[in-house]
C-alpha cells in the first residue's frame, strides 16, 4: 500500500479490523468501513474514526450487502469468531462466515474487471486443527475441530474457487491467536482480567494445558499490510508467533499483574467440546516478505490488564 489506496473493510468495528483501519488512516489511505454493529462492535472507535475526512462508515450486514463501494482493496474481517458461541448455536456462524463471504465474492466478481479490487480474506490458524509438534504450513490439509473453524475453512475454499473460476484476485491470511488492548471481553485475556478485577474467578477449560501462540494485534495488522503490499496474489500466508503459552500460565500471569492470589484467581470448568491441544503456524512465507514479530507478550500483557476498559462495549 505504497500509494494512497481506497480500502473497503468489513467488520471494521471488530478487534483486528479496527486496528487495521487505524493503521490505514495513519498511512493516509481512504477507508470505507462496512459493519453491522453486532454485540462485539466497538462504538467508541467508530466515533474516533469518523473525525477523519478519509473515513466513511456503512452500517450493513455482509450477508445482505447489495452494493460494493469503489475500492482498490477489499479486506474481509467480518466474522462470528467466539468458539463457545459456535458450539452452542452454529447457524449464525454458517450464515456470516460462509454465506456472507460468498455474497462479498459475488459483489467483487460482478465489478468490471478494471474495477475489481483484490479480495483479502482474513482467516484463522484454527482451520488446520491442532498440532502436537511442529507447525502448520500453508499447504497443509485443513482439519477444523469446531463449527467456527469449519465455517472459516469453508470460506477459504470459496475464495480459492472464485479465483480459479471467475478470475478474482485474492489472498488468504491466517493469523494465530490475537491479543491486545480493547478486545471484546469474551476472549481469554480480557475476560479473565475483567472477572478478577471484579472479585470473581476466571473460568478455565479443563486443566489449562492447551497451548496457544500469542500474536499482538499490531503485529498481525503489519503482517496483513505486508501481504497486501508485497505478497503474491492467489496465495495463502500464515502469520505466526514465537510466543507460545499454556492457558493456565496466561491466567496466572494476569492474576499476578492484578494482585490476585492464584488460589482464588480461577476455577476449572469442563473441557470445551472439540478442544484443540495446540496451534502453531509456520510463517516462513510472510517473513520472507520482510515481516517480523515486534511485540513481546510479557511486556504487552501488563498494559492490557492495567488499562482494561470494557465501557466501550457496554
Image: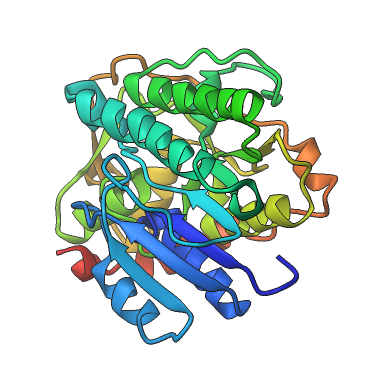
- Residue 205 place in picture, x, y as percent: 30, 27
Q: Is residue 225 left or right of residue 184?
A: right
Foreground of the two, 44 or 65: 65
Q: Is residue 16 left or right of residue 292?
A: left
Residue 267 falls in image quadrant = top left
Looking at the image, residue 73 lies above or below residue 235: below
Report whether residue 307 is seen. no
Q: Residue furthest front?
A: 112
Write the residue at 48% across / 59% down: 8
Q: Where's the N terminus, which quadrant?
A: bottom right
- Residue 234 place in picture, x, y as percent: 70, 34
Report whether residue 163 is seen. yes
- Residue 37 place in picture, x, y as percent: 23, 57
Residue 46 falls in image quadrant = bottom left
Q: Is residue 35 left or right of residue 38?
A: right
Write the residue at 30% across / 25% down: 94
Q: Where's the C terminus, which quadrant?
A: bottom left
Write the residue at 56% across / 28% down: 162
Amino acid at each position: 500500500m505504497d500509494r494512497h489506496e481506497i480500502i473497503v473493510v468489513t467488520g471494521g468495528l471488530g478487534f483486528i479490523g479496527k486496528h487495521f483501519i487505524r493503521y490505514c488512516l495513519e498511512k493516509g489511505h481512504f477507508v470505507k468501513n462496512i459493519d453491522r454493529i453486532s454485540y462485539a462492535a466497538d462504538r467508541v472507535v467508530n466515533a474516533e474514526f469518523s473525525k477523519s475526512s478519509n473515513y466513511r462508515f456503512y452500517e450493513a450486514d455482509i450477508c445482505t450487502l447489495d452494493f460494493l463501494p469503489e475500492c482498490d482493496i477489499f479486506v474481509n474481517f467480518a466474522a462470528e469468531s467466539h468458539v463457545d458461541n459456535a458450539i452452542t448455536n452454529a447457524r449464525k456462524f454458517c450464515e456470516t462466515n460462509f454465506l456472507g463471504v460468498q455474497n462479498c465474492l459475488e459483489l467483487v466478481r460482478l465489478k468490471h474487471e478494471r474495477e475489481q479490487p483484490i479480495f483479502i480474506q482474513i482467516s484463522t490458524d484454527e482451520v488446520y486443527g491442532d498440532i502436537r509438534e511442529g507447525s502448520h504450513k500453508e499447504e497443509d490439509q485443513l482439519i477444523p475441530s469446531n463449527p467456527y473453524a469449519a465455517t472459516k475453512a469453508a470460506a477459504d475454499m470459496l475464495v480459492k474457487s472464485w479465483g480459479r473460476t471467475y478470475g478474482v484476485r485474492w489472498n488468504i491470511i491466517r493469523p494465530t491467536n490475537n491479543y491486545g488492548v480493547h478486545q471484546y471481553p469474551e476472549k481469554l485475556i480480557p475476560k479473565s482480567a475483567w472477572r478478577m478485577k471484579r472479585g470473581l474467578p476466571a473460568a478455565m477449560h479443563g486443566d489449562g494445558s492447551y497451548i496457544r501462540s500469542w500474536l499482538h494485534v499490531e503485529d498481525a495488522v503489519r503482517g496483513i499490510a505486508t501481504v497486501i503490499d508485497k505478497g503474491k496474489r492467489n496465495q495463502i500466508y500464515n502469520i505466526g508467533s514465537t510466543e507460545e503459552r499454556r492457558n493456565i500460565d496466561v491466567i496466572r500471569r494476569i492474576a499476578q499483574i492484578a494482585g490476585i492470589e492464584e488460589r482464588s484467581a480461577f476455577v476449572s470448568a469442563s473441557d470445551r467440546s472439540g478442544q484443540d491441544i495446540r496451534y502453531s503456524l509456520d510463517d516462513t512465507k510472510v517473513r520472507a516478505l520482510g515481516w517480523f514479530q515486534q511485540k513481546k507478550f510479557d511486556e504487552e500483557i501488563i498494559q492490557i490488564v492495567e488499562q482494561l476498559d470494557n465501557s466501550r462495549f457496554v
